[in-house]
């Protein structure tokens, strides 16, 4: 009887422990503990001491993985992700001795886990980065794994869970938390879960702290409620140097995809841009830089990609022109010193049929970065970005800068997002370059090329709730791009969603402002207008956007109408 009571008590404690809420303090304790543990040399430990040490490392690993799934701050997730990768390397090197790996456990190689793996497959390059669909599948896989462990496994098998999840799902294991769904995709909002007092009471994890989804590329959002370029928005350095850890397992010292920082989650940041520029300049100006090892080349490519993204998306045309020299020299440096470790021409990501269709959009590569050429290039670049996010890995990201330069020369850094639209009918290449709207670092909101007078500003204020809903509806439809395999279908979704957004904005001004206000609509459409004039969108007619797939009800109605028509014809005869 006493044994049964003890067993019930132990199970209850375990369940209670598993249901603990998220805790930032606990996350930091686990992170600090695991960083200390992986500094110990494996060869210095023997027997029972090594066994106990590995148990502690695995426990801390599971703790950090679990707590990271709660975090909404991109900075914290990136930092914890690096720590988890380094810990995985340490565990594989030192703790996965014979009989100690999850691969040696009947729990993880049994039929239960195989059923989960086959029911919710997570392999392939389409799962290299997370999005609502991949996270939905991962969470289903995770639930299946947890059910299997609870019903079929020994309590000691819990210690191997974290390593099994990371080996099975890579970055999804910590990037996909309960927060990740088709309605909660923004990774950049502030993490308020650990700071209830700051916002007055206990904040629900799904409270209205969400910012608008900008699809992780920073160029197509309309988040007026937040300064997207606030350089102080994160208290931690996004790219920590690793401190005093120097034995090969410290932060950012792992030579995997964790050292690829650009460009899936890139945001305009003047300090970040200067870091990349300085690092790239030091590399290509080094007279002794004859031989470059693979790791240095990876860093050079990443800095090159970073500077190109920041330059083309965030600064004025005049400042872009000043950087012509460094881009040309950097591309030449990479060709001479780094292409021996791999080129985009040898990378399958850039040789797909879908990527070739993207290249076809970049039809005008002569005559420099003029308006028409930049419009074609921006269509090509966005198509490429979508294709990389959908089908390629973080490793493939390293080659995108060289790919763009080889395909579009100086347009790859001289064509900015704001150049895709007209401002008051004027080409943004020819009108006043002193206007601050050219420089994304110098202003509060996102793209607002048209200055709104008082009357238009009042109209925008009155219609804001309606226009926000227009934006939400467009974002929901654009998410289908990431799970759609057909290129033409993705193009149609892109074009139709923007057209519907424009029509919705006009409806908002008619309803709240006693008539259509083109300047208000233009101010909200600035980051999307180039879709409307792209060659691929011009070929899609409005009726194609309104004609959705016919369901069973439509087919039934059509059959009924044909039957009635046939009956009428027979009666007349």
Image (cartoon, rainbow, N blue to C red):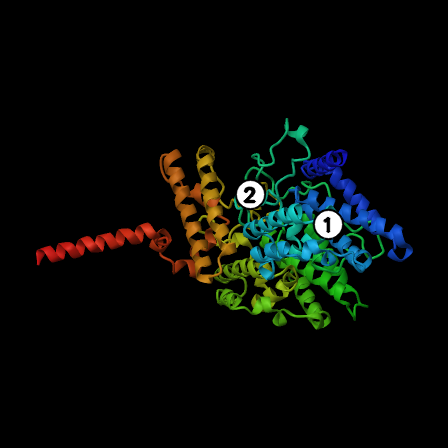
Q: Which mark is residue 157?
A: 1
Farthest residue, direction front: 1
Farthest residue, direction left: 573
Q: How many marks?
A: 2
- Could one spot residue 513 in this view of the protein? no
Horizontal side of 438 relative to 517 (left or right) equals right
- Residue 90: which quarter of the image? bottom right
Q: Which mark is residue 252?
A: none
Q: Viewer-proximal residue, 14 or 53?
A: 14
Q: Viewer-proximal residue, 532 or 452?
A: 532
Q: Viewer-proximal residue, 38 or 487?
A: 38
Residue drawn at point x = 67 percent, y = 28 percent: 197
- Residue 210: which quarter of the image? top right
Q: Quadrant of the N terminus?
A: top right
Lower position in the chain sequence, tag 1 or tag 2 = 1
Q: Secondary structure at mark 2?
A: loop
Horizontal side of 573 relative to 295 (left or right) equals left
Q: Badge 2, how many Cα within 10 Å: few under 14, some, many 20+?
A: some
Q: Of circles 1 and 2, which is in front?
A: 1
Q: Percent from the top left, x then y, of residue 284? A: 74, 64
Q: Percent from the top left, x then y, of residue 22? A: 68, 37
Q: How far apart in space, not on screen, are marks 1 and 2 (Cα)? A: 32 Å
Residue with the mark numbered 2 = 184
Q: Quadrant of the C terminus?
A: bottom left
- Could one spot residue 383 in this view of the protein? yes
Q: Secondary structure at mark 1?
A: helix
Q: Viewer-proximal residue, 101 or 190?
A: 101
Residue drawn at point x = 89 percent, y = 58 percent: 43
Farthest residue, direction top: 200
Q: Percent from the top left, x then y, of residue 434? A: 57, 48
Q: Badge 1, how many Cα within 10 Å: few under 14, some, many 20+?
A: some
């Amino acid at each position: 009887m006493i044994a049964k009571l003890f067993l019930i008590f132990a199970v209850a404690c375990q369940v209670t422990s598993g249901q603990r809420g998220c805790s930032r303090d606990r996350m930091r304790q686990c992170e600090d503990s695991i960083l200390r543990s992986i500094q110990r040399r494996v060869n210095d430990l023997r027997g029972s001491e090594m066994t106990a040490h590995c148990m502690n490392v695995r426990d801390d690993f599971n703790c950090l993985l679990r707590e990271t799934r709660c975090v909404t701050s991109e900075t914290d997730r990136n930092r914890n992700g690096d720590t988890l990768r380094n810990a995985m390397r340490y565990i594989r090197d030192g703790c996965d001795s014979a009989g100690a790996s999850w691969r040696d456990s009947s729990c993880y190689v049994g039929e239960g886990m195989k059923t989960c793996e086959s029911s919710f497959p997570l392999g392939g390059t389409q799962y290299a980065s997370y999005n609502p669909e991949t996270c939905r599948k991962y969470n289903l896989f995770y639930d299946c794994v947890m059910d299997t462990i609870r019903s079929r496994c020994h309590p000691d098998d819990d210690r191997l869970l974290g390593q099994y999840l990371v080996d099975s799902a890579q970055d999804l294991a910590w990037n996909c938390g309960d927060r990740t769904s088709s309605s909660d995709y923004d990774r950049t909002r502030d993490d308020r879960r650990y700071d209830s007092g700051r916002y007055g009471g206990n904040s629900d994890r799904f409270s209205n702290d969400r910012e608008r989804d900008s699809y992780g590329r920073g160029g197509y959002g309309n988040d007026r409620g937040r300064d997207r370029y606030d350089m102080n928005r994160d208290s931690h350095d996004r790219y920590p140097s690793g401190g005093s850890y120097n034995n090969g397992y410290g932060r950012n010292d792992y030579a995997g995809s964790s050292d690829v920082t650009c460009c899936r989650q890139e945001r305009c940041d003047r300090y970040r841009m200067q870091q990349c520029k300085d690092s790239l300049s030091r590399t290509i100006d080094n007279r002794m830089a004859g031989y470059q090892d693979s790791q240095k080349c990876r860093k050079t490519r990443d800095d090159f990609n970073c500077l190109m993204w920041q330059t083309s998306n965030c600064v004025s045309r005049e400042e872009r022109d000043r950087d012509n020299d460094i881009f040309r020299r950097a591309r030449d440096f990479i060709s001479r010193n780094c292409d021996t470790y791999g080129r985009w021409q040898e990378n399958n990501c850039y040789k797909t049929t879908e990527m070739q269709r993207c290249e076809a959009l970049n039809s005008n590569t002569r005559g420099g970065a003029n308006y028409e050429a930049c419009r074609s290039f921006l269509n090509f670049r966005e198509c490429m970005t979508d294709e990389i996010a959908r089908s390629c890995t973080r490793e493939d990201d390293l080659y995108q800068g060289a790919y763009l330069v080889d395909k579009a020369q100086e347009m790859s850094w001289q064509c900015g997002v704001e150049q895709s639209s007209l401002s008051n009918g004027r080409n943004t290449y020819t009108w006043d370059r002193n206007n601050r709207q050219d420089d994304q670092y110098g202003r509060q909101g996102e793209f607002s090329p048209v200055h709104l007078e008082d009357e238009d500003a009042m109209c925008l204020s009155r219609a804001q709730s309606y226009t926000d809903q227009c934006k939400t509806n467009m974002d929901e439809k654009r998410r289908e791009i990431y799970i759609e395999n057909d290129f033409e279908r993705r193009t149609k979704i892109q074009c139709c969603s923007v057209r519907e957004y424009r029509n919705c904005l006009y409806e908002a001004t008619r309803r709240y402002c006693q008539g259509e206000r083109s300047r208000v609509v233009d101010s909200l459409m600035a980051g999307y207008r180039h879709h409307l004039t792209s060659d691929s969108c011009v070929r899609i007619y409005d009726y194609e956007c309104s004609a959705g797939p016919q369901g069973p009800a439509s087919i039934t109605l059509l059959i009924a109408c044909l039957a009635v028509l046939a009956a009428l014809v027979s009666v007349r005869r």
